[in-house]
Image (tube, rainbow, N blue to C red):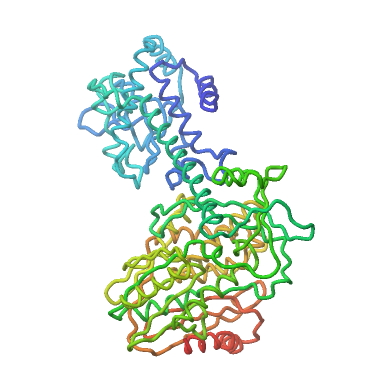
Amino acid sequence: RRIKDTYRSVKAGLSWSLPNSRVKDLVAYCVSRLNNRRTSALNSKLSPRVLFTGTKPNYKKEFSLSFGDYVELYNGTTNTSAERSVGGIALYPLGNSTGSWQFWCFASKSYVRRSTWTKMVTTDVIQRTMSALALEDPVQSLADTVAEAEIAEADDAENENVPDLVDHDDADSDSEDEDDEEESATGDAVPSRQSARIAAGIRPPERLTLATKIDRAMALATKVREDANEGTVNAVRVELIQLFSEMEALLPVKSVTTSAEILNAIMIVVEKFLASGEHDKWKGRLVADGRSQDRDLYPDKASPTLAIHSLFTVLAFYAGLIGYLMSKVDIKGAFVQTPMTGPPVYLRLNKKIASQVVHIYPEYKDFLQPDGSMLTQMLKAMYGCVQASSLWFALLTKVLLAHGYVASQTDRCVMRRESGGLIFCILIYVDDLLIFASKAETERIRKFLTEAFTTITMSVDNTISYLGMQLLWKDRFFIVDMDFYVRQLLKDWMHLPVKANPGTRNLFKIDEKSELLAVKPRELFHSTVARILYLAKRVRADIITVVSFLCTRVTKATEEDQAKLESLLGYLKRTMTRKLYLHAMTSRQLLAFIDAAFALHFFDSKSHTGVIITMGGVVIYISSRKQKCIAKSPTEAELVGLTDNLGLVELFHEF
């Protein structure tokens, strides 16, 4: 509708009658203009063209003409008395890097493209000439129109597998000499946007017609939806079978006392991917809504998780050692293998979840409540309960301690065991275990974990996906990358230009006159900064300072802060494949570098601390953060940085 409205408006403004052969050119002009305008359907302030190509249009050239303007075009230099310019009509911009336009040349009666021209006044002579062309131009038959559309579609289908374009050289070259060549030597016989193959009259195969392509696309979309639906239903049923049969975590009951603690159940289904971006599986998880639980009844509800710097220290330690295998263990239904303690807690399954339970276990139909829901008693710790994580960690560490492993004094999630001069290590992150051990010890671990938890998945390889990172163990070094995570992070920001640096000189300066972001843009700003912080704390320490500052602005972000965030995203776009390399330690020497920038934060005059810790020449910890108190001098700022991080250095020394 918008194209039609624009078409009618431009056509009504012409001072001459529009020939039928120029209709398609006017449509191309309208489309190009609409693509350069932002619409209410877009969340950003950028036009569809900028979002798609990532480059801004050449405003000085593309918007200097309108459809139907009379221009004089350069026609070459000769030693004769022939005119060096010819008249033409502006049709539409080509959208390339040189800002060229497509023109209709009066002299050759053909399309030409030029990057230079001179705009003239449209006189009565030009108006009569164009109106005469309209009278001479026959109306194209419907059959010819359909045939032309099918051929053009087939030509597009043949070329749809070409590599992605970087610059807009498809419509024009950067050479003005090439741009100034005429496209055809004879009138309308060969439209400007058809290939030579189409112009020669070669018909496409029937399988490449538009209708067939649409059918195939619809069939593919339907198959994707069906696979997703089948995957989610199967994931739900697998989870319910695990809870009711394999783990015996839930027991249906017909009624409970009025004072009983009843939590609502929530079924979550997600598609899981490996760190490489490959599909892993559909995962269903029945969780309890523990928000209604009284926290005061569970004082010991917290459980630790593996610190990232502990992981990097272990990787650097084992990088240069031989005789060890790297393996990963995933314990199926970890929490629901942990017996509940204390007063009984009940879980209410809503009508949809209860119907799936009855589908699997028809004998449970008698336990349905009048509203279709189902009450169950939690015999095992369910995900979502405030005490579940603490109970699980206690159970897992009890098993490991029973088989000779000892927890590190500085990180309880690092378990070690010495045997025959070798040091074996197990890293714990909830139910995911990363293990470095000999072949015999790896097999021993597999056996006692299987005995304790029945179902585990163990993978032994030099490449393992762990905590969203891809770990590749090569000769005397580890490569840690999060390429898939970065691609997902930048998916909605690829239109931004690349930047050479993550921040600018005015990073810490705040313009108080800059407007605050609206609610939704501020929420997007907050979530994007949080996602980048997750990346920076793991493999991208080069952006940690910029991210640290942006974290202080998430609750009061302004247009200026948004520009700083986009600059950082542009840098990530330029370095999206950068990885972290952890080489083998050359010694056990621990070095810590701590420095502070005095009164760097202009708004409140607080200083900023940077920390780098190395062990054996390998960087294992980097941080950059704002100090919590105001220092009165640079010396005091450095003392504050030292006292704040001296305990961390001591922890690494004891590790």
**In this figure, what is the number of numbered marks?**
0
| Quarter of the image where one finds residue 153 | top left
Q: Residue at x 53, y 50 (%)?
A: 269
Residue 553 position, x and y percent, is: 62, 65
Of the pair 636 and 354, the residue shown nearer to us: 354
Residue 145 position, x and y percent, is: 37, 17
Residue 149 position, x and y percent, is: 36, 22
Q: Residue at x 51, y 73 (%)?
A: 396
Which quadrant: the N terminus? top right
Taking the image as shown, residue 312 lies to the left or right of residue 440, namely right
Position above or below: 110 against 639: above
Taking the image as shown, residue 272 lies to the left or right of residue 196, namely right
Of the pair 593 and 364, the residue shown nearer to us: 364
Q: Residue at x 52, y 56 (%)?
A: 242
Residue 554 position, x and y percent, is: 62, 62
Residue most extreme to the left: 79
Position above or below: 552 against 214: below
Q: Residue at x 46, y 58 (%)?
A: 570
Of the pair 413 and 560, the residue shown nearer to us: 413
| Quarter of the image where one finds residue 363 | top right
Of the pair 377 and 513, the residue shown nearer to us: 377
